[in-house]
Structures are given as C-alpha cells and as structure tokens.
Amino acid sequence: MKITAIKTYPVWLGQLLVKVETDTEIYGWGEAGMPHRSRAVIGALQHFSDYLIGADPMRIGGLWQEMYRNQYFEGGRVLAAAIAGIDIALHDIVGKALGVPAYQLLGGSHRDYVPCFATTSAGSLDQLIEDVKLLLNNGWNAIRTWMARGRLDGQPLYEPRESIGLTAQWLTQLRQEIGPEPVIGIDYHHRLSVAEAASFCQRMPAGTLDFLEEPIRDETPEAYESLRTMIDVPLAIGEEFSSKWTFLPYIERGITNFVRLDVCNVGGLTEAMKIASMAESHYIDLMPHNPLGVICTAASAHLAAAVPNFAWLEIRDSPTEQLGHYSQELFPIQPQREGSHILVSDRPGIGVEVDEHLAAQRPLEIRKPGPLLRRRDGSLTNS
Ligand SMILES: [Mg+2]
C-alpha cells in the first residue's frame, strides 16, 4: 500500500480535518490541532506531502520520526499539530487494513467506556450551583468551570485580583452546597502569575478543588515548581505541549498531577501513547484536552481505551454546554455517547466517517482574531 494524497479541510466548525488517501480503496481521517493557526499547519502538511506521497502508510512510527526529525529543525507546535493529523489518519488506515479498531493497534482495550467531564461557564454563583446540580442529576460527576470575568465597555475584561477573590468564594460555597463526592476543577487558562495562583488557592479550604488547570503559562517548569511549594491543589497541565520532551519535566519532577495532553497538538496517537507510559510510571492519570471535533474525540477515546491510567476526557456537549462541534451532518459516523460516557467504537480504524463534499463546501472562514482579552489598564492577558 502507498500514500497517494494528503488533503486538508479546514471546516466551518473550527476544525482542521486531514484525509490521507492510498492506492487502495482505504483512506484515513485525522485532525490537526491549532485551527486558529490553520494556514501554518496546512503549510507544514504540504511540506510533509512532498515526501509522504509514495510512502507505506503501515510504517506509522517510522513516518512519525521522519516528519518530526527530517530537515533538522525538529518539532515545535506547528509541526506537531500537522504530524497529529497524519498520525491519526495512519492509525485509521492501518486499522481498516487489518480490520481492527485503533485501540487494538495501541495494545488493546482496558475499559468498557470512557468517562468524560463536563464544563459550565456560569457567570454567577447561583448559576454555577444550578448548573452543577443539573449535571450531577444527569450523571456527570466530574465538572469543570471557568474563572469569574467581567466586561468593560462591551469588551471582555479580565482582572486577576478581582477574579480570584470572587471565584474562590463561589467555589467554596459550591463545595458546601454539593458535598465532598463530586469532582470539581477550574481552568484559569494561563492568566495568573505565580503569586496570584497561590493567593487564589489559599483563599479556599483544603478539599474545595480536585484540580486546577493551567493557572500560569507553561514555558518555565521551574515557575510551576515554585507554585507547587505554595499550594496543595492537584494541577492539570499540558494542553499546549507538543511532544514527550515538553511533558518530561512536568512528569518527572512531579509538577503536574493530571496529564492534559491533546492528541491533536502533541503529535497524534504515537506520541500520546509514549507520554501515557511516562505518566503511568509516575502514577499520573491522563485527562485529555479535547475542545476540537469528532475526530479528536474519537482518537482520544481510542487512547483512553488503550491505557490503564485514565481519569476523564473533556467533552464539549453536555446539559450545560452545546457548542455544536459534533455535527452529525458532517460526521455521519462518530463515537456514540451515553450520558457522561463515550462508547469506544469497534469499527475498524478510528470509527469516524466524514461527508467530504460538505467539508469542501463549508470551509473555515479565516478571519481576524477575536477580541483580545484586556486587563482594566489596557494591557493584554491570555485569551
Ligand atoms: Mg484548558
């Protein structure tokens, strides 16, 4: 079997779909990360096409090395996102060629279903309590929320000190309201300094939070180590990481307590499995980042099936959130979900089918970035 074409479809849902065709009737679908940088990722995929056309798609690991290390300047986020799109598609092709689901290629299944967590974007304490109770009543026992933020002159405003005081108060009251059992986490999206993150955690009683996701930026593991000494809340880090090497210090030094890898950012299933093994050896569970589409969800579900160390998969469709990312029209075959559980597909490959005609008809509109997130003094914070 030989690869004959690599096609890209940046679709209106904000997802960059990748199709790898072969000289047989078999083809594979993948998804590449960083859709807001899709022009750069598509460019990287075009570079890969130059030498992947004619290659044997069964050589998944060898082709991964060639994509990552060829041309000397190894890795980085753009290349890793592009590699992910190809790597997932190759798992789809090889699974179809062998007649087995992708998780079988990764070592076989560990579980009957994949537990997921839901998100609420409640903007007040009353709404937060109402949302969490709605989720709990519908069988979701792992729930994530966001920080309190405001608006100024119609534009998004984010002021750390105003946010941490209010958010800590909401979470403390939420925990009193729902009791000790439900899992509650919060994502601060890289918007705090070390001092602000420490003050935030210190304003809540121990046991309020089960995880704090990405409170500060992650370029410097030593900054997280400093924060680690000041707080007792488990950390969930890694959604932007682009290889096992970026995860290495966070896992080896015990900085993160959940691995937030994104299979579409980190270089696909090949790299995700290696990171999962590193995490397993440190008794750290995966909590994959999954804000994209059906293919990322399906690939993440196969990963979840194939590893022993798994907590929850992010899913962006629940009683409190309907982002419309999982279009049945575009993806007529996709992973089935029962409440907060994803059922892992037994179809050969990753178990997704795409309406390619529709994907070509409704491209992602490349537009200017959305409104920047400002502080009260006008300075920038992470969006
Ligand atoms: Mg996050």
Image (cartoon, grey):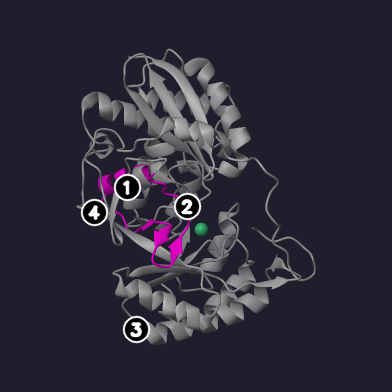
Which secondary structure lies at badge 3? loop
Spatial separation of the CA atoms under disc 3 and disc 4: 26 Å
Q: Which badge, 3 or 2, comes first in the chain's sequence?
A: 3
Q: Are marks 3 and 2 in contact (CB under 8 Å)?
A: no
Q: Quick check: can you spot residue 204?
A: no
Name the residue nearer the viewer: 46 or 138: 138
Q: State the residue in front, 251 or 344.
A: 344
Residue 22 vertical placement versus 264 (above, below): above
Q: In whole angstroms, how far apart are the C-alphas of marks 3 and 2?
A: 28 Å
CB under 8 Å between discs 2 and 4: no
Q: Which residue type carries mark 1?
A: Ala
Marks 3 and 1: in contact by CB < 8 Å? no
Q: Which residue is mark 4?
A: 113
Q: CA distance from mark 1 to mark 2?
A: 13 Å
Q: Which residue is mark 2?
A: 291
Measure the alpha-carbon separation of dots 1 and 3: 30 Å
Q: What segment carries the magenta color?
A: 299-328
Question: Which residue occupies 24% across, 33% down?
Answer: 348
First in residue order: circle 1 vs circle 3: 3
Type of amino acid under label 4 = Tyr
Q: For the residue carrying disc 1, how many other residues have a C-alpha within 10 Å: few (<14), some (14-19), or many (20+)?
A: many
